[in-house]
Image: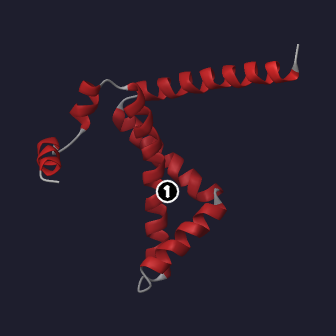
Protein backbone atom coordinates (compact mmCIF):
# COMPACT_ATOMS: atom_id res chain seq x y z
CA UNK A 1 0.00 0.00 0.00
CA UNK A 2 1.20 3.51 -0.78
CA UNK A 3 2.75 5.42 2.15
CA UNK A 4 0.57 8.44 1.41
CA UNK A 5 -2.60 6.32 1.63
CA UNK A 6 -1.48 4.79 4.94
CA UNK A 7 -0.71 8.25 6.30
CA UNK A 8 -4.15 9.51 5.22
CA UNK A 9 -5.86 6.57 6.92
CA UNK A 10 -3.95 7.21 10.15
CA UNK A 11 -4.83 10.93 10.08
CA UNK A 12 -8.48 10.09 9.44
CA UNK A 13 -8.60 7.63 12.35
CA UNK A 14 -6.90 10.16 14.65
CA UNK A 15 -9.48 12.79 13.65
CA UNK A 16 -12.31 10.39 14.49
CA UNK A 17 -10.72 9.61 17.87
CA UNK A 18 -10.25 13.31 18.63
CA UNK A 19 -13.82 14.16 17.66
CA UNK A 20 -15.12 11.30 19.81
CA UNK A 21 -13.01 12.47 22.76
CA UNK A 22 -14.25 16.06 22.39
CA UNK A 23 -17.84 14.82 22.15
CA UNK A 24 -17.39 12.89 25.40
CA UNK A 25 -15.99 16.03 27.03
CA UNK A 26 -19.12 17.92 26.00
CA UNK A 27 -21.25 15.39 27.92
CA UNK A 28 -19.61 16.22 31.25
CA UNK A 29 -21.72 18.56 33.44
CA UNK A 30 -20.92 22.23 32.84
CA UNK A 31 -19.64 22.97 36.35
CA UNK A 32 -17.28 20.01 36.15
CA UNK A 33 -16.11 21.25 32.74
CA UNK A 34 -15.29 24.66 34.18
CA UNK A 35 -13.40 23.04 37.06
CA UNK A 36 -11.43 20.88 34.64
CA UNK A 37 -10.85 23.95 32.48
CA UNK A 38 -9.28 25.75 35.44
CA UNK A 39 -6.96 22.81 36.00
CA UNK A 40 -6.13 22.69 32.28
CA UNK A 41 -5.39 26.43 32.32
CA UNK A 42 -3.03 26.05 35.28
CA UNK A 43 -1.22 23.23 33.47
CA UNK A 44 -0.97 25.33 30.32
CA UNK A 45 0.46 28.21 32.35
CA UNK A 46 3.04 25.92 33.89
CA UNK A 47 4.15 24.09 30.74
CA UNK A 48 3.73 26.60 27.90
CA UNK A 49 6.65 28.75 28.99
CA UNK A 50 7.06 30.56 25.68
CA UNK A 51 3.35 31.46 25.57
CA UNK A 52 3.47 32.55 29.21
CA UNK A 53 6.31 34.94 28.42
CA UNK A 54 4.38 36.39 25.48
CA UNK A 55 1.24 36.87 27.59
CA UNK A 56 3.23 38.45 30.42
CA UNK A 57 5.01 40.79 28.02
CA UNK A 58 1.74 41.82 26.35
CA UNK A 59 0.12 42.55 29.70
CA UNK A 60 3.17 44.59 30.72
CA UNK A 61 2.97 46.59 27.48
CA UNK A 62 -0.77 47.21 27.92
CA UNK A 63 -0.59 48.02 31.63
CA UNK A 64 2.85 49.50 32.37
CA UNK A 65 1.69 50.72 35.78
CA UNK A 66 0.95 47.14 36.97
CA UNK A 67 3.51 45.61 39.29
CA UNK A 68 4.93 42.14 38.69
CA UNK A 69 2.41 40.44 41.01
CA UNK A 70 -0.54 42.03 39.20
CA UNK A 71 0.85 40.98 35.83
CA UNK A 72 1.40 37.40 37.02
CA UNK A 73 -2.10 37.26 38.49
CA UNK A 74 -3.66 38.54 35.27
CA UNK A 75 -1.58 36.10 33.16
CA UNK A 76 -2.71 33.17 35.31
CA UNK A 77 -6.32 34.29 34.99
CA UNK A 78 -5.88 34.51 31.23
CA UNK A 79 -4.66 30.90 31.06
CA UNK A 80 -7.49 29.78 33.34
CA UNK A 81 -10.03 31.32 30.97
CA UNK A 82 -8.21 29.73 28.05
CA UNK A 83 -8.61 26.29 29.61
CA UNK A 84 -12.29 26.90 30.26
CA UNK A 85 -12.71 28.26 26.74
CA UNK A 86 -11.53 24.97 25.28
CA UNK A 87 -14.45 23.22 26.97
CA UNK A 88 -16.86 25.93 25.82
CA UNK A 89 -15.71 25.44 22.23
CA UNK A 90 -16.52 21.73 22.54
CA UNK A 91 -19.94 22.64 23.89
CA UNK A 92 -20.66 25.09 21.10
CA UNK A 93 -19.83 22.44 18.52
CA UNK A 94 -21.71 19.49 20.00
CA UNK A 95 -24.57 21.01 22.02
CA UNK A 96 -27.93 21.78 20.45
CA UNK A 97 -28.84 25.44 20.02
CA UNK A 98 -31.55 25.09 22.65
CA UNK A 99 -29.16 23.68 25.25
CA UNK A 100 -26.53 26.30 24.46
CA UNK A 101 -29.01 29.18 24.69
CA UNK A 102 -29.94 28.06 28.22
CA UNK A 103 -26.32 28.67 29.28
CA UNK A 104 -26.25 32.23 27.95
CA UNK A 105 -26.91 35.01 30.41
CA UNK A 106 -28.57 38.30 29.43
CA UNK A 107 -29.51 36.91 26.03
CA UNK A 108 -32.31 39.45 25.58
CA UNK A 109 -29.89 42.31 26.29
CA UNK A 110 -27.51 40.79 23.74
CA UNK A 111 -30.24 40.56 21.11
CA UNK A 112 -31.22 44.19 21.76
CA UNK A 113 -27.62 45.28 21.25
CA UNK A 114 -27.51 43.38 17.97
CA UNK A 115 -30.57 45.23 16.73
CA UNK A 116 -28.99 48.65 17.32
CA UNK A 117 -25.63 47.92 15.70
**Residue hosting label 1:** 79
Quarter residue 98 falls in: top left
Q: Residue at image x 53%, y 46%?
A: 40
Answer left or right for 21 relative to 95. Answer: right
Identify whether 24 is placed above or below 43.
Answer: above
Q: Position of residue 14 (x, y in %)?
A: 67, 24
Q: Quadrant of the C terminus?
A: bottom left
Using residue 114 as the reference point, say whether residue 13 is left or right of it. right
The front one of 17 and 47 is 17
| Residue 96 image-quadrant placement | top left
Q: Position of residue 74 (x, y in %)?
A: 43, 68
Residue 15: x %, y % from top left: 63, 25
Q: Residue at x 48, y 47 (%)?
A: 83
Q: Quadrant of the N terminus?
A: top right
Q: Is residue 17 above or below residue 38?
A: above
* Viewer-nearest residue: 87 or 32: 87
As drawn, which residue projects farthest toward the front?
117
Dot 1, how many residues are within 10 Å of its Cα: few (below 14), some (14-19), or many (20+)? many
Image coordinates of residue 106 in percent, x first then y, are 15, 45
Depicted 105 relative to depicted 27: above or below: below
Under circle 1, the secondary element is helix
Determine the residue positioned at 81% across, 19% down.
6
Q: In front: 6, or 27?
A: 6
Amino acid sequence: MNKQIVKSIIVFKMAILLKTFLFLLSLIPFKVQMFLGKILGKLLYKFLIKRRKVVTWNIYKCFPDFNKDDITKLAKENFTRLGQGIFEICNSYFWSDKKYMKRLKNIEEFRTCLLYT
